[in-house]
Image (cartoon, rainbow, N blue to C red):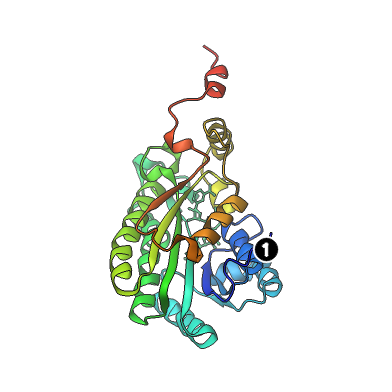
Amino acid sequence: MSHQLLKGKTGIIFGALDESSIAWKVAEKAHESGAQFILTNAPVALRMGAVQQLAERTQSPLVGADATNVEDIKKLIDTAESTFGKIDFILHSIGMSPNVRKGRAYTDLNYEFLNKTYDVSAISFHKVMQEAWQRDIMKEGGSILALTYIAAQRTFGKYNDMAEAKALLESIARSFGYHYGKRNKVRVNTISQSPTPTTAGSGVAGFDKMLIYADKMSPLGNASAEDCADYCIALFSDLTRKVTMQNLMHDGGFSSVGVTEEILENLNL
Ligand SMILES: NC(=O)c1ccc[n+]([C@@H]2O[C@H](COP(=O)([O-])OP(=O)(O)OC[C@H]3O[C@@H](n4cnc5c(N)ncnc54)[C@H](O)[C@@H]3O)[C@@H](O)[C@H]2O)c1
């Protein structure tokens, strides 16, 4: 479907790693919708190669940047400025927990790892926005998004320290959204997405069962990566100019349900 909702708009998309990545789907749909953008990911992710094909297909510059490294972000913003001038949108689609990766339980966290979790998964969002703000690179009425998960509000035991990182991420969106709204009418929101089979998602222990559980608990079923990309396009477009400082549930209704018949029927009591 080519509605050209983003025709003439420019932006930066963080976090497309492979075809399953939510950011990958956003890039494809942003391209179809008429946007131009820079694709960026950590240098180690670029070396894996898949994202080069996406860059070619969408005719996008590809820039390596560790989102925790302010110097890298400065260079990325330089490239955005020299390519597009001011930009309309930024997608932060980044998450990583060394505690999850190394199988540390929530009751046995390594605190250096915890700091890394916060830095990569939440503080990087502040770093990107602070650099964008200081360089005044966002156009009036632009839109900035990050992706989050409901473990920020409710406990999912195996989500580990990512729960705290997502709570911090959502708070940063609200706080920066206040300042950006006042100065530039720029929107800042987080989308709280259903469990989605991607590299980051599948790293959470018991992910396959969480996926089925969430699907059975959601009247509309789980939102896919493609569904999430559609929502991102709507939020980058001019049709949502008064939506800001929100954590927007994009979960097929999961967050409002107590229990469904499908779950009850599957209980073997
Ligand atoms: N998959 C899910 O179930 C799910 C659910 C809700 C929210 N989310 C969120 O969606 C976002 C995207 O994740 P995904 O599921 O598409 O998985 P993904 O693994 O495809 O994307 C995560 C990305 O983060 C990047 N990244 C990691 N460290 C980085 C760094 N230092 N600098 C720059 N980039 C770095 C990775 O290279 C990767 O591209 C994450 O914030 C994730 O927490 C995912």
Which residue is pictured at 48% across the width and 85% down the height? 85
Q: Which residue is drawn at 64% across and 69% down?
A: 31
Q: Position of residue 113 (x, y in %)?
A: 39, 55
Image height of 22 relative to 183, above or below: above
Q: Looking at the image, which residue sits at the far bottom?
A: 82
Please indicate, yes or no, whether residue 137 appears anywhere in the rendered image. yes
Left or right of 215? Residue 188 is left
In this image, 76 relative to 4: left or right?
left
Q: Which of 250 and 195 is in front in this view?
A: 250
- Which quarter of the rendered picture does the N terminus lie within? bottom right
Label 1 near ligand 1 (CB < 8 Å): no
Foreground of the two, 97 or 261: 261
For the residue carrying disc 1, how many other residues have a C-alpha within 10 Å: few (<14), some (14-19), or many (20+)?
A: few
- SS under mark 1: loop
Residue type, label 1: Ser
Residue at 63 percent of width and 76 percent of height? 60
> Percent from the top left, x then y, of residue 205?
52, 40
Q: Is residue 203 above or below residue 115?
A: above
> Where is residue 145 drawn, in percent x and y?
45, 61
Residue ID for mark 1: 2
Image quadrant assignment for residue 43: bottom right
**Number of numbered callouts drawn:** 1
Residue 92 seen:
no
Please state if 241 lies on the left or on the right of 252 as rendered: left
- Front position in the image: 93 or 250: 250
**Residue situated furthest top in the rendering:** 269
Instruction: Estimate the x, y position of residue 155 in percent, counting from the top left.
Output: 38, 37
